Amino acid sequence: MSLNELYQNVILEHNRSPRNYRSMDDTDRKAEGHNPLCGDQLTVWVRVNDDVIQDASFQGSGCAISRASASLMTSAVKGRTRREAEELFRRFHRLVTGTLEPAEAETLGKLAVFSGVSEFPIRVKCASLSWHTLKAALDAPGHTVSTE
Amino acid sequence: MTAAPVPTLATPVPVPLDVERLRSDFPILGQPVRGKPLVYLDNAATSQKPQVVIDAVTRFYASENANIHRGVHFLSERATLAYDAVREKVARFLNAGSAREIIFTRGTTESINLVAQSFGRAVLRPGDEVLITGMEHHSNIVPWQLVCEQTGARLRAIPITDTGELDLEAFDRLLGERTRLLALAHLSNALGTINPVRDLVARAHARGIPVLVDGAQSAPHLGVDLQALDCDFFACSGHKMFGPTGVGVLYGREALLERMPPWQGGGDMIASVTLERSTWAPVPAKFEAGTPMIAEVIGLGAAVDYLSAVGLTAVAAWEHELLAVASQRVGDIEGVRLVGTAPAKASVLSFVMEGVHPHDIGTVLDDEGIAIRAGHHCAQPVMQRFGVPATARASFAAYNTLEEVDALVRGLRRVRQVFG
């Protein structure tokens, strides 16, 4: 497994210029995520209307994998229902842990760039931190999740 | 580059190390990692082991294994002698007053917990204070938080300056009427700062305050003379000084150990037991309940012999040169900021790179076979003090070379390339 497959250009680009990197004042659906191993810390905001995610955003500090993951996630979940977002997370999690069928990986769209993470088990937490935090914001806003 | 004299050593004329020969004593160093020669720069986390230590542990299990201090048979007697001989060795290595002042523990963490739970619980009253510093490893913070919660005492911390040194004016202010113990690192694992321990011990003693020194990082790198330091407790770990994991040392001043209650009860720590009450064995046995880590202690003995033969003076001088060269060359890389720039430093080079998270630095270096640590180094208050979530840390041992410093610098240039 080469380093280029972990740090694909899309990931490096989203790390440099993350999308949806802002706070949101007009929602109370917000959660904190924390990865004690690396010191990664992020906040995810989400606005839901009629069970559809209208907007999602994040802020925080973390490695390239966790920033790019949060950036691509916030873009990917917009316009999806909660149930669809949760299903996406399940597939994403299987992608980064190396248990997703290649055919299914195609359904992940841009998120498939994280396939290289499965060869670096220690980085799985970095890739999934924003997703766990999104889930907390949807399920129990205001809570802090930790990957430990 | 010429190395400056090592300020912590009494003898400034070191015998140069034969680093290549030293390297050949460590089998793991010959192993390729990710198709590249291993460059092991994570020595502050744990050191590698020389063959003599590996052999000592293997030989113990292969031909000497028995429980100690109670058997009447041949093997038990031999194991007991070997175990107790290491106590003498460690006492000499650290220049303790007597082997009775050496307690074997699982490591630095357990040593500090022992002092917190035995000495701390016996001494601390509500409103009393334990003084630590802002550069401590979690293992010299959390045990004190626990005992403060149990006793109603208060934990206070000496702040650190922008270069990563203790703020000595604040130290004098914080050392107060209610201070019952000062506990501080000899050599910071996150910053590399060498604290002026001898001076601080003297100032604390002038007010009758005992001092615990966390020597996890100093014991393998500085050469420790406990009688000169004059501290009351000193904790270190075997695995950071070429020994096995799972064994460490607590030195305690004998008069204090005598007065302290046991912290764990069980076999081997008693004089007599009835169903109503028990009496304690003399120190150090009072603090070593249950079957100890015998093989690991034997391995620690081999590590102490090995380190003594190499010579801490030579080790410290060589590591000083490695650190000086690495600090300059890594510091010169675009966007790199060193975290911890005290004049007196050893072994540890902590840094951050603009726009690149330390974890990503670690992964790119790992791809080159270079092992460093990325994270908060179990010293989160230090990270908070310097306003960084984490740092990258290269930490040196006697077997590291200037070529490995080159490899580190090349690796960091590649990090810059990857992350633009």
Image (cartoon, coloured by chain):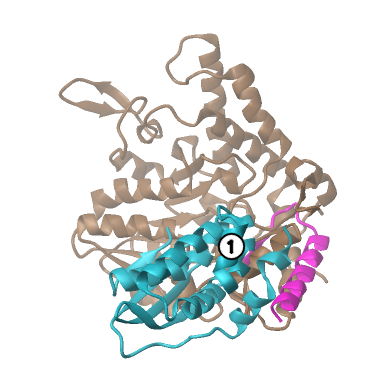
Q: Is residue B232 above or below residue B273?
A: below
Which image quarter: residue A133?
Answer: bottom left
Nearer-the-camera pick, B202 or B318:
B318
Q: Amino acid at mark 1?
A: Ala
Q: Secondary structure at mark 1?
A: helix
Residue sitting at the far left:
B276
List the residue tagged with mark 1. A105
**Shown colour of chain A:** cyan
Residue B250 percent across, percent down from the top left: 45, 44
**Shown colour of chain B:** brown
Q: Is residue B400 magenta?
A: yes
Q: Quadrant of the N terminus of chain B?
A: bottom right
Residue density around tag 1, few if under 14, some if 14–19, many if 20 or more, within 10 Å: some
Q: Is residue A103 magenta?
A: no
Residue sitting at the far top:
B73
Left or right of residue B411: residue B190? left
The answer to whether any part of residue B257 appears in the image is yes
Number of marks in the rendered image: 1
The magenta span reads: B393-420
Residue plotted at (77% across, 70% down): B409
Which image quarter: residue B408?
Answer: bottom right
Residue plotted at (55% across, 52% down): A99
